Image (cartoon, rainbow, N blue to C red):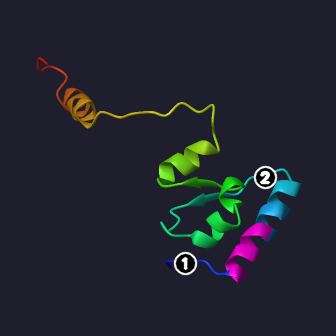
Amino acid sequence: MTEIDDDGLGALIFCHARIVRSGGVLKLLSLPLHVSLMVLTKLDTEFEVFIEEQDAVNSFFPDRAVRHYDILEWVQEQGRRQAPDLPE
């Protein structure tokens, strides 16, 4: 989908109002570059919009530490577990 029409926008507004009223939040992910109706109606200021899915998910958990994994470190650890007598 590359565009949102007025019915889709109305559905977003309806959902946003219901969710906010019940204490929730509605966030959007991967909007097309030219969602002119949202910009025109200034609704882009009401919705938090994310480009990356992981950023959107993390936004629901602001206090959660984001872990970064080093694949080389993991592979080396697996090697040490399989052959504990070998030097590093």
For the residue marked with disc 2, what is the amino acid? Gly
Secondary structure at numbered mark 2? loop
Pointer 1 local density, CA inside 10 Å: few below 14, some 14–19, many at least 20: few
Image: magenta residue range: 6-13
Residue at which label 2 appears: 24
Residue at the far left in the pictured view: 87
Q: Which mark is residue 87?
A: none
Look at 77% across and 68% down and name the residue there. Answer: 13
Residue at 11% x, 17% y: name it: 87
Q: Is-magenta flag for residue 12?
A: yes
Q: Residues within 10 Å of mark 2 (few under 14, many from 20)?
A: few
Discs 1/2, front = 1
- Tag 1 residue: 3
Q: Position of residue 58 (x, y in %)?
A: 56, 43
Q: Earlier in the sequence, mark 1 or mark 2?
A: 1
Q: Is residue 19 above or below residue 79?
A: below
